[in-house]
Image (spheres, rainbow, N blue to C red):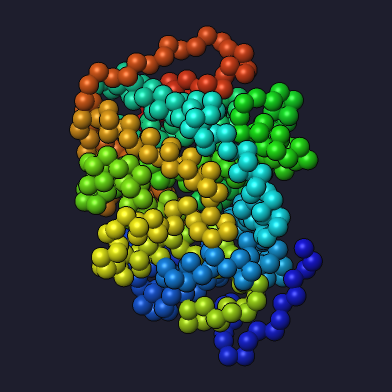
């Protein structure tokens, strides 16, 4: 792409940089983001200028405007080279979110380049999407088996009744096990991956090094599978597009690891939370055995991505009560848009099955998750949630919902822990015996107990979670 020509600013509208923007990531936002969205909406309307870690951006709050930004690819670009502040060198050199945006992969491409890369992923995922294919059947069986194994490990450690953290002891290891299986990666590539993805998404001081480590791990995996193809997503992506270099494939695997571990993991945790905190509509769907609807209703109440990745205005345009200039960064807020939808919704449509599918948990428009990825993600979430309530006869939060600790970040709003008191409804699932030293390829079927121990070392500095 050639350097983008930026026209002069409109005479009838202030520059984003000239507005007195309010910092978004405050203690108030950590405690109650919905209140912050509501205050911004009352003050500015559907679109508000905010400061994001020292950088001014437009935050899109209302559902209609969010859909407009997500769907209109010709006006709202994903390619970071459209960002005026970056092109003019006005971003802080150590801005913690920049490392993730600089990774050149499908998520940050536009039009034909984006469609081609997306088509490669969709084709590579197709064998795993088909429930009747050997790959699809095996993956579905593996997800259910891993969930049962983790419940079995929990019972072996804490008994048939006790206390557990459904984040550290269930959801995060489950998604890492699924990633290891689907990507065909040796265990040693996966142990610290989830923590580095957190560091990147949450914009901490070590976001840059964390991004580099995750990319390096995925690039090594691409080279490994090029030399030793297997029955996995990595090998199928190489089969679909043999021209992919190890670095290009590593970037695509990196993006999918983010979606699979953090975004899908948040959807599992948020769905469990909505059930446990007593969300009546979510509980009714679960009681009726409608796991897909349970997930949809939970995503509407608590989406896994609060504020979506930036879009950049290709041309000057009116949005909400402001004129957005070409090159301005815009962040569509799924959480605020859902808040708006539910407020409108005091209409009967919001309670209907059709309206629950209006959630933005998987995105919308040309850059929404490909259908194969959405179906697989939905399957993983439904299986993970269903297995918990199949095995647990009783489960309740051990902290009030308003005291649960959340990760403070500009993109996701994810729980740090999900502490529960539980009782199993029957005999615990059996736990496979620890495997003997295995050949590298055999290690791709991760043992839950070993992975759980590795995660605890990373997350608690070698101390056992309490």
Quarter of the figure with residue 154: top left
- Kindly identify the residue that appears in the image at 57 percent across and 42 percent down: 256
Q: From this view, report whether residue 95 is shown above or below residue 401.
A: below
In the image, 402 versus 140, the foreground residue is: 140
Give the residue furthest to the front: 132
Is residue 338 at least partly visible in the picture?
yes
Taking the image as shown, residue 354 lies to the left or right of residue 95, namely left
Residue 394, given in percent of the width and then of the height, sits at 20, 33
- Kindly identify the residue that appears in the image at 67 percent across and 37 percent down: 237
Q: From this view, report whether residue 318 is shown above or below residue 252.
A: below
Give the residue furthest to the bottom: 12
- Kindly identify the residue that appears in the image at 47 percent across and 74 percent down: 47
In the image, 111 versus 299, the foreground residue is: 111
Is residue 90 at least partly visible in the picture?
no
The C terminus: image quadrant: top left
Taking the image as shown, residue 7 lies to the left or right of residue 29, namely right
Q: From this view, report whether residue 422 is shown above or below residue 259.
A: above
The N terminus: image quadrant: bottom right
Taking the image as shown, residue 279 lies to the left or right of residue 265, namely left
In the image, 104 versus 63, the foreground residue is: 63
Q: Number of marks in the image? A: 0
Quarter of the figure with residue 87: bottom right
- Kindly identify the residue that appears in the image at 71 percent across and 81 percent down: 7
In the image, 394 versus 136, the foreground residue is: 136
Residue 301, given in percent of the width and then of the height, sits at 33, 56
Residue 101, given in percent of the width and then of the height, sits at 63, 55
Taking the image as shown, residue 215 lies to the left or right of residue 56, namely right
Give the residue furthest to the top: 436
Residue 373, given in percent of the width and then of the height, sits at 53, 44
């Amino acid at each position: 792409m050639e350097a983008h020509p930026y026209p002069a600013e409109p005479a009838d509208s202030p520059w984003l940089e000239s507005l007195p923007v309010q910092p978004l990531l405050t203690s108030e936002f950590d405690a109650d983001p919905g209140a912050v969205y509501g205050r911004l909406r009352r003050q500015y309307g559907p679109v508000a200028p905010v400061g994001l870690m020292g950088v001014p951006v437009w935050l899109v709050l209302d559902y209609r405007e969010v859909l407009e930004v997500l769907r209109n690819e010709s006006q709202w670009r994903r390619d970071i080279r459209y960002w005026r502040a970056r092109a003019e060198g006005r971003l802080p050199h150590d801005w913690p979110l920049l490392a993730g945006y600089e990774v050149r992969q499908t998520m940050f491409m536009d039009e034909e380049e984006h469609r081609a890369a997306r088509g490669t992923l969709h084709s590579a995922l197709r064998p795993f999407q088909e429930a009747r294919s050997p790959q699809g059947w095996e993956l579905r069986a593996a997800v259910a088996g891993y969930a049962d194994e983790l419940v079995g490990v929990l019972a072996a450690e804490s008994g048939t009744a006790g206390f557990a953290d459904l984040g550290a002891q269930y959801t995060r290891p489950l998604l890492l096990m699924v990633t290891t299986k689907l990507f065909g990666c040796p265990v040693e590539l996966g142990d610290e991956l989830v923590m580095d993805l957190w560091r990147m998404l949450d914009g901490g001081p070590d976001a840059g090094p964390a991004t580099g480590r995750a990319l390096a791990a995925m690039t090594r995996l691409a080279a490994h599978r090029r030399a030793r193809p297997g029955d996995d997503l990595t090998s199928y992506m190489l089969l679909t597009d043999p021209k992919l270099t190890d670095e290009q494939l590593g970037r695509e695997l990196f993006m999918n690891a983010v979606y699979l571990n953090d975004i899908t993991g948040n959807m599992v945790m948020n769905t469990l939370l909505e059930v446990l905190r007593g969300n009546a509509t979510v509980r009714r769907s679960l009681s009726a055995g409608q796991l897909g609807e349970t997930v949809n209703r939970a995503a509407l109440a608590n989406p896994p991505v609060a504020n979506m990745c930036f879009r950049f205005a290709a041309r000057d345009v009116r949005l909400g009560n402001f004129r957005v200039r070409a090159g301005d960064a815009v962040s569509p807020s799924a959480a605020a848009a859902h808040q708006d939808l539910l407020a409108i919704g005091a209409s009967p449509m919001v309670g209907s099955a059709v309206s629950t599918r209006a959630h933005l948990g998987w995105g919308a428009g040309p850059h929404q998750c490909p259908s194969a990825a959405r179906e697989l993600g939905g399957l993983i979430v439904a299986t993970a949630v269903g297995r918990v309530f199949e095995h647990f006869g009783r489960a309740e939060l051990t902290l009030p919902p308003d005291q649960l600790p959340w990760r403070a970040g500009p993109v996701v709003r994810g729980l740090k822990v999900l502490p529960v008191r539980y009782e199993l409804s029957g005999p615990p699932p059996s736990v496979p015996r620890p495997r003997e030293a295995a050949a590298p390829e055999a290690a791709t079927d991760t043992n839950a107990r070993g992975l759980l121990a590795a995660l605890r070392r990373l997350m608690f500095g070698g101390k056992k979670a309490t």
